[in-house]
């Protein structure tokens, strides 16, 4: 291989080209930029505060591996912060066990305690049980709702104050466009850099410190730092709408660099305005399970009942 | 020139490219949007305009969510 056309501004060979900034960066300068951007996101929006127990949600994928590494790198010297890693095992044979193995390797490398919580223990079902049972809702609906619930209860059990998710700018921009295309302004309110304020201590806030990084940047960082990651695809994935939006955004980012960041920034401004007029009723407790919910029964109880009904009719 | 291409999670393949082709041109030849892949050559991260030489082994890491 010959060298790239342009080196990094520091003179070292380029490793990554940021098309939206027309900037070549070496590995070292790229890592610094990533770390600075995440530190700035955390500070600007006060995502992590003093004396908190921080739960990093890890799946074994590139984004959560990068989130774990960055939290360790940026906060390992903060004696008032306590890092713990949490993995949800949805029960997907041939897929999740590879992710869990990757999580274990990274957690051992950074000396971060790692806890695994399973759908089977929490709900008595696995995603392998549910997949194919409900074509109308699809497996991703079940997985998303149950995973959010289990992460929240796991965080409470572990005494975690804030949950760190590995969502990147692409994930954020996809969600923004999906909400716009569905006309779901209420769901838009729950987006943005800072989670909506809730007085309910049962609800553990979830933050996204990687939201200013493109997916290709989190991937490049994971490769540069030699993180162990599982790059396979879930065998049950059916998110046709998200995949269509994702592909559209990737094409836009290629043709018009910076599009993804623009979607996220514009959404943040809109969300701030929407929250000024937030007339949603406050979350209540589900009368069936007692967990915080915007509806009664909650989505988890509704879905579990639906599974029971589907199983009994089969 | 001949380039060995290894996409993580897929079978390796060989690409025939003109001399001094770049990583970006390799991705275009493979029908891949460069935004969706991170490339390494000889274990080093490289940008799309890095020039390849005959016999290089390019490893491509998918930068798309896996569900």
Image (cartoon, rainbow, N blue to C red):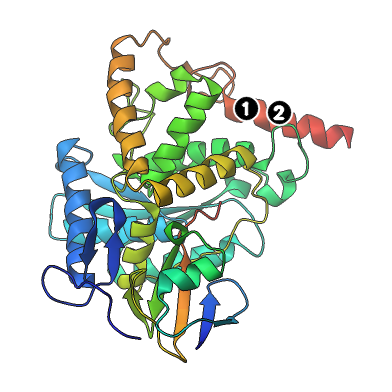
In the figure, A296 relative to A50: above or below?
Answer: above
Q: CA distance from mark 1 to mark 2?
A: 6 Å
User: Which class describes the residues within 10 Å of circle 2: few (<14), some (14-19), or many (20+)?
Assistant: few
Q: Is residue A102 left or right of residue A34?
A: right
Quadrant of the rendering where the N terminus of chain A is positioned: bottom left
In the picture, residue A106 is in which quadrant? bottom left
Residue A305: assigned label: 2
On whether disc 1 and disc 2 are found on a single subunit, the reply is yes
Residue A301: assigned label: 1
Can residue A298 be seen in this snapshot?
yes
From the top left corner, tell me how far across and down residue A283 is, in percent: 43, 17
Q: Secondary structure at mark 2?
A: helix
Q: Please, which chain is the residue tagged with disc 1 on?
A: A
Residue A313: assigned label: none
Quadrant of the rendering where the C terminus of chain A is positioned: top right
User: Which class describes the residues within 10 Å of circle 1: few (<14), some (14-19), or many (20+)?
Assistant: some
From the top left corner, tell me how far across and down residue A121 is, in percent: 59, 48
Q: Nearer the viewer, residue A35 or B30?
A: B30
In the picture, residue A67 is in which quadrant? bottom left
Q: Nearer the viewer, residue B59 or A51?
A: B59
Q: Residue furthest bottom?
A: B55
Q: Residue furthest front?
A: B18
Q: Please, which chain is the residue tagged with disc 2 on?
A: A
């Amino acid at each position: 291989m010959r060298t790239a056309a342009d080196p990094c501004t520091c003179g070292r060979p380029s490793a990554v080209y940021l098309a939206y900034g027309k900037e070549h960066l070496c590995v070292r300068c790229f890592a610094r930029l990533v770390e600075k951007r995440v530190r700035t996101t955390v500070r600007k929006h006060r995502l992590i505060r003093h004396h908190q127990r921080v739960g990093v949600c890890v799946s074994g994928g590139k984004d959560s591996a990068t989130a774990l590494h960055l939290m360790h790198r940026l906060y390992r010297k903060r004696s008032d912060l306590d890092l713990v890693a949490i993995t949800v095992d949805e029960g997907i044979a041939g897929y999740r066990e590879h992710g869990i193995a990757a999580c274990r390797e990274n957690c051992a490398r950074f000396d971060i305690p790692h806890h695994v919580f399973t759908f089977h223990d929490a709900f008595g079902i696995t995603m392998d049980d549910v997949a194919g049972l409900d074509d109308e809702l699809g497996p991703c609906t079940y997985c998303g709702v149950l995973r959010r619930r289990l992460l929240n209860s796991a965080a409470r059990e572990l005494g975690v104050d804030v949950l760190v998710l590995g969502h990147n700018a692409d994930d954020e921009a996809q969600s923004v466009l999906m909400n716009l295309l569905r006309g779901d302004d209420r769901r838009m309110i729950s987006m943005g850099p800072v989670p909506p304020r809730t007085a309910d201590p049962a609800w553990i806030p979830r933050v996204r410190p990687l939201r200013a990084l493109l997916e290709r940047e989190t991937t490049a960082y994971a490769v540069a730092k030699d993180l162990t990651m599982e790059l396979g695809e879930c065998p049950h994935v059916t998110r046709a709408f998200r995949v269509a939006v994702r592909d559209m955004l990737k094409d836009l980012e290629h043709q018009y660099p910076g599009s993804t960041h623009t979607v996220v920034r514009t959404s943040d401004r809109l969300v701030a305005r929407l929250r000024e007029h937030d007339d949603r009723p406050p979350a209540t407790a589900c009368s069936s399970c007692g967990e915080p919910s915007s509806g009664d029964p909650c989505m988890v109880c509704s879905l579990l009942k639906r599974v029971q009904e589907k199983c009994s009719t089969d | 020139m001949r380039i060995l291409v290894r996409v993580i999670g897929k079978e390796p393949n060989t690409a025939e490219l003109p001399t001094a082709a770049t990583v970006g041109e390799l991705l275009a030849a493979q029908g891949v949007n460069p935004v969706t892949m991170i490339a390494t050559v000889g274990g080093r991260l490289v940008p799309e305009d890095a020039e390849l030489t005959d016999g290089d082994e390019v490893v491509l890491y998918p930068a798309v969510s896996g569900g």
